[in-house]
Amino acid sequence: MGNKFTSRTEDYSKWYNELVGRAELAEHSDVRGCMVIKPYGYAIWEKMKDVLDLKFKETGHSNAYFPLFIPKSYLSKEAKHVEGFAKECAVVTHYRLKNDENGDVVVDPEAKLEEELIVRPTSETIIWNSYKNWIQSYRDLPILINQWANVVRWEMRTRLFLRTAEFLWQEGHTAHATKQEAIEEAEQMLHVYADFAENFMAMPVVKGVKSESERFAGAEETYCIEAMMQDGKALQAGTSHFLGQNFAKAFDVKFSDKEGKLSHVWATSWGVSTRLMGALIMTHSDDEGLVLPPKLAPIQVVIVPIYKGDEQLAMITEKVIPLMAELRKKGISVKYDDDDNKRPGWKFAEYEAKGVPVRIAIGKRDLENNVAEVARRDEKTKETVEWESLLAHIESLLHEIQDNLFNKAKAFRDEMVTEVSSFEEFKDVLDNKGGFVSAHWDGTIETEDKIKELTKATIRCIPLDSEREEGVCVYTGKPSTRRVLFAKAY
């Protein structure tokens, strides 16, 4: 283990990559653009997955699984959808390999597929092809399904967790009898995501809708949660789409209502991915490494014994075993690191880099005084705690760390929202401060494209809670009725 990371102020991108490596979250694989998620990184993803999975089930959804391969013809049924993903599709053309005369493995030219298969970039088309067979009457609705899967989008510029050619995600796909029901579903899932981001990831988010040009391919409305990273760039942390009847019409999915009248069904889709890992890292971490909110930390408490010889270790272990049992009884995950191949200082740096929220050190003198040293990762402070009150102290400390991380991130985010009224001011904020720029916009794609071309900033969202406010567009001076949030983004 090297000592310090590159600092965030020195080179944010390098800091991020070093942290992902040193905290043993993931690494690049030999497959271009794809990553290996290492056990510690995967353990965090599993915690996220477990919480979200429960939330989906509590809101009436069931898990299912659909094929990885999508016939090319399915994608061409919904024009906007295929256009949105065409440049990112991986295509399977053959189904067999053979040995050539040199003994090398080659693709068998005889084994060409009649119809090429697309490795799923997202599953709307294959799922709606199934829904066509599942839906006949209003009694078959709503269909509320989620799938945990991997998807492939052929990215050229990749970055661990944030943008990789293959990534893990969940995608919900629902079918409804009425437009209103589908809109309510899309909004409900947005709130589920926001609740998860704020209460588990300790990451404040802005809930909003996307502008037309930033909308999901084939959607009528895209709802999103946007978060602010420490380098002043925004990150889209989750999206929920009201798809209207676009996919139902493309795949001819109709149902007969109570009067026997045939209508197309209404649809939604929604998803979050391993990008959330990138968001988690960049929201809280510091120059010493990863900082994890306790609710998502695979190890919430680590105990490091400091001893000379087996006898001292045995005494410390005897003292620690009942404490660990009590912690586990309360649902707190704890690790006792008595590995004698590594020095305590090395262990401290290791658990700091991995973002373990609470570290307890206990040595011979602590045993004699019936105390332990408790260090908290978020504030990097240490205190000596009486053994009798240690259990209660750890329990309340974990709650305190969770709240503190959210409050710190929220204070930072709030500070990074700047209202501007001129384009000069707009550019100045983006160049010198970053963050969200709250500005009036005339509502046209042309203006949005022009601003993006000039500043690299896009409309991150039109906040759901934004007040109507008469004003003029920051770029064209045309009338506008509300402010939207612009930012440079991941």
Image (cartoon, grey):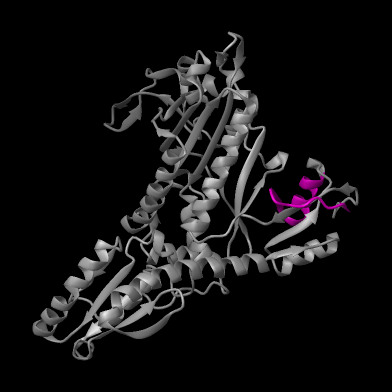
- Residue 306 screen position, x and y as percent: 22, 83
Q: Is residue 368 left or right of residue 246?
A: left
Q: Is residue 350 left or right of residue 314?
A: right
- Viewer-side residue, 381 vs 181: 181
Residue in the picture at 60% in, 40% down = 187
Quarter occupied by residue 429: bottom right
Residue 152 in view here: yes
- Residue 191 screen position, x and y as percent: 56, 46
Q: In the picture shown, does residue 163 fall above or below 140?
A: below
Residue in the picture at 90% in, 48% down = 478
The quadrant in which the C terminus is found is: bottom right
Residue in the picture at 78% in, 66% down = 428
Q: In the picture shown, does residue 237 fall above or below 282?
A: above
- Residue 324 screen position, x and y as percent: 22, 69
Q: Which residues are magenta?
A: 447-471
**Is residue 463 highlighted in magenta?**
yes
Q: In the picture shown, does residue 140 fall above or below 205?
A: above
Residue 350 in view here: no
- Residue 343 screen position, x and y as percent: 24, 80
Q: In the displayed image of the protein, which residue is found farthest to the top?
A: 260
The quadrant in which the N terminus is found is: bottom left
Q: In the displayed image of the protein, which residue is found farthest to the left?
A: 311
Q: Is residue 231 left or right of residue 101?
A: right
Residue in the picture at 55% in, 70% down = 408
**Is residue 259 highlighted in magenta?**
no
Q: In the picture shown, does residue 384 fall above or below 16?
A: below
Quarter occupied by residue 233: bottom right
